Image (cartoon, coloured by chain):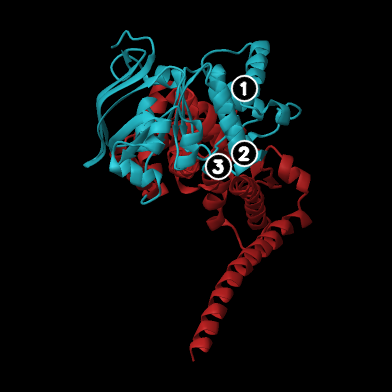
Chain colours: A red, B cyan
Amino acid sequence: MKRQVESAIEKFILLNGVACIFFVVLIFLFLAREGLALFKTFSPLDFLAGTRWYPISTPPKYGILPLFLGSLIVTLGATVISVPLGMACAIFIGEIAPRWLREILKAGVELLAAIPSIVIGFIGMMTLAPWVKYLFHLPTGLTALSGAITLAFMAVPTIVSIMEDAITAVPKSYRAGSLALGATHWQTIYRVVLPAASSGIVAAVMLGIGRVIGETMAVMMITGNAAVIPTTILEPVRTMTATIAAEMGETVQGSEHYFALFAIGLVLFVISFLINMTAGAFLHRERK
Amino acid sequence: MVSEPLLKIEVKSLNVHYGSLQVLKDVTLSVNKNEILGVIGPANSGKTSFLRVLNRLIDLTPDVRVRGEVHLDGINIYAKMNAEEVRKRVGMVFALPQPLPLSIFDNVAYGPRRHGLHHAGKLAEIVEKSLKAAFLWDEVKDRLSTSGMQLSGGQQQRLCIARTLAVEPEVILYDEPCSGLDPISTAKVEAAMFELKKRYTQILVTNNVKQAARVGDRVAFFLMGELVEIDQAGRIFTAPRDKRTDDYVTGRFG
């Protein structure tokens, strides 16, 4: 009896594990089938390198370059803001803060991660966008910069918590060894702790970027949704994710436009996959 | 007393608490220049805490309170010096050999670089001198750029001694430096200590009573945070004044 229960539980767990992979494969196959269908009627080169996204003109143009660049500029902006902020925060929590403050800060960072992205987007739209408009004398505050700042706040919790884990995992003996040689606290952090934690730090950055590039609702609310190639960060842009979310409801299933949106999804999938692979490779390297 | 040139370190009425736990009780002793002081005692006797007081590494322990005075060349290291300065002058070798995750060369050059020396030629000179003094040069001279973590345990420990020497301290503290080493490596570390006597004052905390007898000029016996006895090594091991010392060195407890 006991053995049967044991074996049943094992099979159940195995089934769950296999199901996870099975669903991922199914999702990918579905995405690939629907996305690649676009290329029966539309050239892949015009899709990837086309500078115009006019899905309802005649003939329609499905060039995702403006959307790709929109995602890129928002993501880069968010990275530039969130990485130094997250890194400084992780170093402070992991190395400098006294124990009682550390617990408070960690709880705070987790709380930040718990805020729904739509709420962050809403706050950004109501408070941040008017400031951007005012400070830079723009016709609208809904710009790539506003999006980057908003998304940075979503990436920071991810970056801080993974980076802090990596920093805390550095053996105490490294710090003691460095300090015993008369190095200062900051020299020890900069010369010993951060290099020793470097693979975890890179992984944290990659996962933060992954979080940003996949974000949809907040970025749709705050970037102004103009599918044009951005020349500065102070212009409205539209990201790949926002395009799918905004247009999916209006397309006819099986139409060229519908397939084009899936093709964008495919591009996003590949980008996210590559980012996660890179992060995983660095995390794995650290464990060895 | 303070102007007495033979005294390198003076400890006066030292009390150390971790939270509500007292780990050192009213310890008063002095260490002479160029001697090796062996410190023995069972687990929890406070000997490692004592060592960490001497180079202020104890500052890193949360909730620690240090009362009493520690003088290095007559200067109070808690009141008149900053921690980095103390640690530069009072180096420490830990129980487990723990090289930094750097090359052999960079491990030894780490200290001097942090103190502002970046001249390549001078660094190379210091690295060679330090590795030679730690009896490691011949074994590693052809692979200075490989990771210090690939060395054997005994080599790593001598690398740690070398990196301590590279900052040119005046005092070297050893916290059970041979606890993880085989007898041959231990002999090499001890040989290095004898050689270093000419220039350095050394304090050796050890669980190995015989090692204290072999290496120490004088030996201090700690028990439950108290300094029971400090005397010439010969005397401690043949005719200790305190019965507890006798019991410990003859292996009746501890």
Q: Going by the image, does B185 lie left or right of A121?
A: right
Callout in the foreground (2, 3): 2
Same subunit, tags 2 and 3: no
Pointer 3 local density, CA inside 10 Å: few below 14, some 14–19, many at least 20: many
Rendered image: mark on residue B185: 2
Q: Residues within 10 Å of mark 1 (few under 14, many from 20)?
A: some
| Residue bearing mark 1 | B133
Identify which amino acid the numbered label 3 is placed on.
Gly
Graded by Cα atoms within 10 Å as few (under 14), some (14 to 19) or many (20 or more), the crowding at tag 2 reads: some
- Residue B59: horizontal and vertical position, in percent? 34, 29
Q: Which mark is residue A200?
A: 3
Cα–Cα span, label 2 and label 3: 35 Å
How many numbered callouts? 3
Looking at the picture, tell me which residue is in the foreground, B78 or A47: B78
Residue type highlighted by circle 2 = Ser
- Mark 2–mark 1 Cα distance, whole angstroms, equals 15 Å
Of residues A277 and B244, the one nearer the viewer is B244
Residue A73 place in picture, x, y as percent? 57, 33
> What is the chain identity of the residue bearing mark 3?
A
Q: Quadrant of residue A126?
A: top left
